[in-house]
Amino acid sequence: MKLAALALLAGCSRFYGLDPPELRADSSRGDDARADAAPDPSLCPSSYTLVDGQSRYRLSANKARWVVAALTCASDGPTGPTYTHLVVIGNDTERAFVHSLDGTSRWIGLSDRLSETQFRWNTNEPVNGYPSLTSVAWGANEPSGGPDENCVALNDTGSFIDASCDVEDPFVCECDGYADDAGRYTP
């Protein structure tokens, strides 16, 4: 009984911000970074004005190839404890939110550039395997591209589609507690 009460109190204190942040190893920096992905809004670039849950987002005004989009988002800074990167969509709720921002097809931080049909996000954010290859998040007959379509966009209907990484599309950047990791998508 006492253990259950302590667990409940620990959860409440975390909710009210009384617990110290947990640390996780960040291989891209070689030191520790905040594990909870809730950025201090004052640390995100001012252009990241769209908020949902623990993340802030920005829609690109320009079109770019997928790798250029990834580099553009990552270079928005800052360098910790918050980071910027192509958006990582962790579940259907976040997918619906990102789609609702403007309904335009946009690059997201998912690709199978390293190994065909093994889609990986561009950060180490835990997403519990989302989306599986059989998920309803994928559009009809997607992913479909084979070795020529290795980058993923959220299309105008709110579904994931794989496409050629050389297509120039607008993109969505995210600011949270997870750093871009080019090793997850650079062959």
Image (cartoon, rainbow, N blue to C red):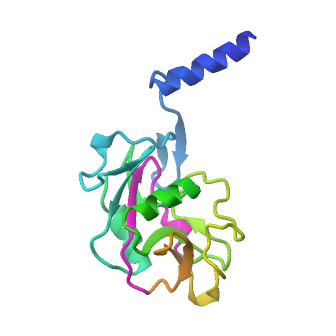
Query: What's drawn in magenta, residue-wise?
Result: 167-187
Question: Does 151 appear above or below 5?
Answer: below
* Outermost residue to the left: 46
> Is 83 left or right of 12, judged from the image as shown?
left
Query: Residue at point 27% right, 41% down?
Result: 42
> Is 5 left or right of 73, judged from the image as shown?
right
Q: In which quarter of the image is the C terminus?
A: bottom right
For the question of whether residue 80 can be seen, the reply is: yes
Question: Does 167 appear above or below 81?
Answer: below
For the question of whether residue 90 can be seen, the reply is: no
Q: Quadrant of the N terminus?
A: top right
* Outermost residue to the bottom: 148
- Residue 76 or 6: which is nearer the viewer? 6
* Outermost residue to the top: 2
Question: Does 17 appear above or below 182?
Answer: above
In the rendering, at what x and y percent does residue 3 appear?
Answer: 72, 14
> Is 167 left or right of 27, judged from the image as shown?
left
- Label count reads 0
Q: Is the magenta stretch mostly helix, strand or loop?
A: loop
In the rendering, at what x and y percent does residue 111 appear?
Answer: 56, 73
Query: Residue at point 38% right, 46% down?
Result: 82
Q: Does the magenta stretch include residue 170?
A: yes
Q: Does the magenta stretch include residue 56?
A: no
In the rendering, at what x and y percent does residue 126 appear?
Answer: 60, 51
Question: Does 35 appear above or below 13?
Answer: below
Query: Residue at point 72% right, 9% down?
Result: 2
* Outermost residue to the right: 1
Query: Residue at point 67% right, 72% down?
Result: 118
Which image quadrant is residue 138 in?
bottom right
